[in-house]
Image (cartoon, rainbow, N blue to C red):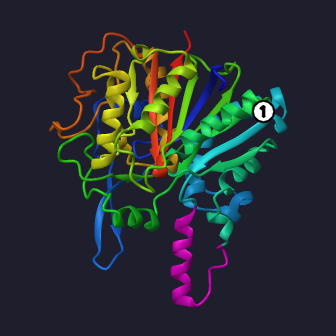
Amino acid sequence: MADSTPYFLTELGMVCALGDKPNTIATKLQSGASSDLTPFSITQEEERSVLVGRVQVPVPEIPEQLLDVASRNMALLLAAYVPIAGEVEACKEAYGSDRVGVVLGASAQGIDVGEESYAYHREHGEFPETYHYNQQELGYAAEAIARFAGLHGPAYCIGTSCSSSAKALIAARNLLASNICDAVVVGGVDSLCQLTVQGFSSLDAVSPCMSNPMSRNRDGITLGEGAALFVMSREASTRRQGPSVLLLGAGESCDAHHISSPDPSGQGAIRAMKGALNNANLRPEQVDYINMHGTGTVLNDAMESKAIAEVFGEETPCSSTKPLTGHTLGAAGALEVGICWLTLTQNARSAKPWLPLHVWDGEADDSLPHLHLVSSSTPIASSPQIVLTNSFAFGGNNASLILGVER
């Protein structure tokens, strides 16, 4: 039986299109601010642009010790690491550096560097001196953070497309459960590049505008970039003031219905959500909010709404936050766990309970179950205590995570 021990997510570092400050991000989640999306030019036979969730706040310069793996990805990852660095140092002191691991989810790591370097090669006949394949190798990010932080526990990346960093949290939990680690730096990172945008565009999966999840007018995803990191451990932080957030349960499935399309029956998603509930010893009615995968594609939204309705009914408040952040692919699972983390912790300090708004045009698709999509008029009687977040990926790689605030 899967481990059902709750584990603490003691700190959060996060950067995305909504910013890098917890209060700023939380405020935008409450207001449904969507003005942070920016145009991204697609270089194809006919050049066009789409809206993306690009990080616009300043990110750290790459330190000398990491110049061999310098990339936009690494800069985003460092931006997310800075806020948790003090907690990581406390864990090193408490447990020893060999007992602190790093597990990250990622997808298009450093591909932008490869694109720029190949463009340079076409023009000059050679690669720039600063280019090395390591910059776009899948596992480099975890090894680089371990090197930067002086950690000697296990360090590796997971790549399962859009569920990568949700799976990373499950893997981190397993390292704690098996007593391989006492703490784990865990999360995900992904950055925008032509390969990603053109790849999804070739599948006719990218909306030219902001994504419109659950609408009858939905026409694809909005891509984005970002990073989110946590420190996961068995114990609450002695440094943190305020409520603690726990990973209460996790469920996984792999329906393998199609290389890119979800199983229309939603059975894989249903198994993941039910698995998370069983793992956390919770009933569906105990979940106060669901952060949907909510990509805004015709097939994903049809599948997910059917699955949620079957497991939870149509009354549990739900929203997709991807219209605000963009779909950050390998970082999406961790980023949306971060959104849930902020929802739980910020509500504990708020006089008025709130949930992240579902941003869309309000035109329901009558062929879908009518879920309780959070709006500005949604009555919220009390602060959420337990939330679930979904991540569904190519190949039917599904993960559902349940978080709760310590009472």
Which element type, helix, strand or loop, lies under badge 1?
loop
Depth check: 355 or 272 in front? 272
Residue 277 shows up from this direction: yes
Residue beneath the point at 26% across and 28% down: 371
Left or right: where 326 falls relative to 143: left
User: Is-magenta flag for residue 243?
Assistant: no
Q: Is residue 378 above or below residue 36?
A: above
Snapshot quadrant of residue 99: top right
Residue at mark 1: 181
Magenta segment range?
Answer: 110-131
Q: Is residue 9 above or below residue 209?
A: above
**What's the residue type where badge 1 is placed?**
Cys
Q: Residues within 10 Å of mark 1 (few under 14, many from 20)?
A: many
Residue 23 drawn at (x, y percent)? 43, 30
User: Is-magenta flag for residue 125?
Assistant: yes
Residue beneath the point at 44% across and 62% down: 196
Depth check: 312 or 163 in front? 312
Left or right: where 66 falls relative to 61: right
Residue 50 drawn at (x, y percent)? 30, 61
Residue beneath the point at 29% across and 41% down: 302
Left or right: where 230 falls relative to 269: right
